[in-house]
Amino acid sequence: MAGSDDIIEHAADFLRRISPEGRAMARRRRERRAAAFRRIARRIVLACAAILGVALAWGFVMGPIGPFGFLAMLIAMALAATAIVLWSAQPAPTPERLATSDIAALPAQTEEWLEKQRPALPAPAQRQLDQLALSLAAIAPQLASIDPKLPEALEARRLIADELPDLIRGYQRVPPSLRRQPLNGGPSPDKQLSDGLGTIGEEIARMNARLADDDLKALATQNRFLEIKYKGDGEMGED
């Protein structure tokens, strides 16, 4: 018979799935899988078309390929499809890989790593992971457009690729029986994890705003320039 803790966990997990963040993340996961499938399918189609083109050219120059040639063509297509599927498989992200990942790919790879950590975290933290993933998706275009050697990029890498994984792995090292208990008069590991994830989420949002600040200023400057150039000229013409 399920205990009260299990019932609470199941209820919290259900609320996570029906929350706006949970639905958004489920949609993003479906979109990523569909995009990956389309990329692999397109490569397989192109490879098979190339093999078919070679077979037709061979038949045109050397004569009909015959049953054995047709079988060889099918085998070549099957081998090409297998090779493409294996080549397209990306290694699972790890904190070590995140630390050396390209800054533009870091948000997506971190999001994938967080998804794999979800089963080992309490339901409230899982909801926070959904919010973090959306924050990572929001900051991804900003990180893709900056020099990875800039202090802002290095700060983002340290927060996303180092401090976030360290927080989650530190929590996972705590024995499950001790995670809900206050330790040494302080908050429980569950509470520490929740507070840490909240702090990181807030910092990612602030970082995104700082990175977008230059773009917002440039847009405002351009808008002001257009107003002075065209509206100003119009008003002067009326006088």
Image (spheres, helix red, strand yellow):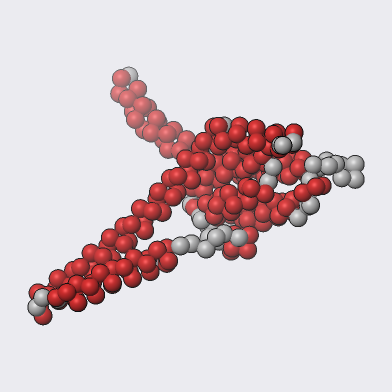
Residue nearer the viewer, 70 or 229: 70
Asked whether, in this view, residue 35 is left or right of residue 154, the answer is left
Where residue 206 sits in the image (x, y, percent)? 62, 41
State whether residue 228 is above or below residue 149: above
Residue at 59%, 63% (x, y): give it: 97
Where residue 154 sits in the image (x, y, percent)? 62, 56
In the picture as drawn, the residue positioned furthest to the top comes out as 239
Where residue 43 sits in the image (x, y, percent)? 32, 61
Residue nearer the viewer, 56 or 110: 56
Residue nearer the viewer, 220 or 120: 120
Asked whether, in this view, residue 84 is left or right of residue 71, the answer is right
Residue at 36%, 26% (x, y): give it: 231
Asked whether, in this view, residue 236 is left or right of residue 109, the answer is left
Number of dots carrying numbers: 0
Asked whether, in this view, residue 127 is left or right of residue 75, the answer is right
In the picture as drawn, the residue positioned furthest to the bottom comes out as 62
Mark yes or no: residue 156 visible.
no
Residue at 74%, 50% (x, y): give it: 171
State whether residue 113 is above or below residue 184: below
Mark yes or no: residue 47 visible.
yes
Residue at 60%, 60% (x, y): give it: 94
Query: In the picture, residue 165 is in which quadrant?
Result: bottom right
Q: Quadrant of the C terminus?
A: top left
